[in-house]
Image: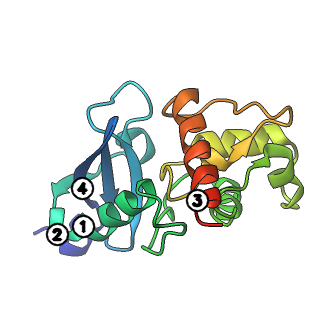
Amino acid sequence: MFNKDVTHDRVFYYDYVTIEPWTYFLTASEAGLTYVGLKGDETVSPIFSFYPHRMLVRDPKKMAPHIKQLKEYFAGIRKNFDVPIDISEFGTEFQRKVLAVVQHIPYGVTLTYGDVANSLAEATSSRSVAHAVALNPVLIFIPDQRVILSNNKVGTYRLGQKEKIRLIKLEKKQLHVNS
């Protein structure tokens, strides 16, 4: 006989949404959003590199609130996400603390990796912060696109530098439209 709770904990629900130019792949546990990536992109940080041994079950109804908020973000009508995020099984405690700081960077604002490092007593360097940010499993919802290099260059991004620049410009444009 199998343990129903253990099986249930291993399930992530998922769905896709196309928001040009990408088709996003989102997953969630019972507790909240766990991953945002691209459909079919197995070359750059596929979900199983973040969360091995998960069973994926497509459930558009369960994923609808997450997809709705992502669409609203790209439409410029959502500045803050309020769906639950579950990165409790992601990375190390330090990496989760870094992402908690990044999650609170205001819409349209960019900070450097050094700024984020300075806000954490545990941070030994901006490099350790950059590594944690680069591993962010929940793109956009935890807005790592808002973290840049100290020389004002954008640095790397899981979806590429062009996409990071596009997201930064989207937010800055919406700030000007709404001011």
Looking at the image, is 74 positioned above or below residue 8? above
Between the residue at mark 4 and the residue at mark 1, the CA separation in whole angstroms equals 10 Å
Between the residue at mark 2 and the residue at mark 4, the CA separation in whole angstroms equals 10 Å
The one of 55 and 18 positioned closer to us in this rendering: 18
N-terminal of the two: label 4 or label 3? Answer: 4
Amino acid type, callout 2: Lys
Nearer the observer: mark 3 or 1; the answer is: 3
Q: Name the residue that disc number 2 marks.
A: 61
Between the residue at mark 2 and the residue at mark 3, the CA separation in whole angstroms equals 32 Å
Between the residue at mark 4 and the residue at mark 3, the CA separation in whole angstroms equals 33 Å
Is disc 2 placed on a helix, strand or loop? helix
Nearer the observer: mark 2 or 3; the answer is: 3
Amino acid type, callout 3: Val
Looking at the image, is 83 positioned above or below residue 120? below
Q: Residue at x 39, y 63 (%)?
A: 72
Nearer the observer: mark 2 or 4; the answer is: 2
Q: Name the residue that disc number 4 marks.
A: 14
Nearer the observer: mark 4 or 1; the answer is: 1
Do labels 2 and 1 touch, CB within 8 Å?
yes
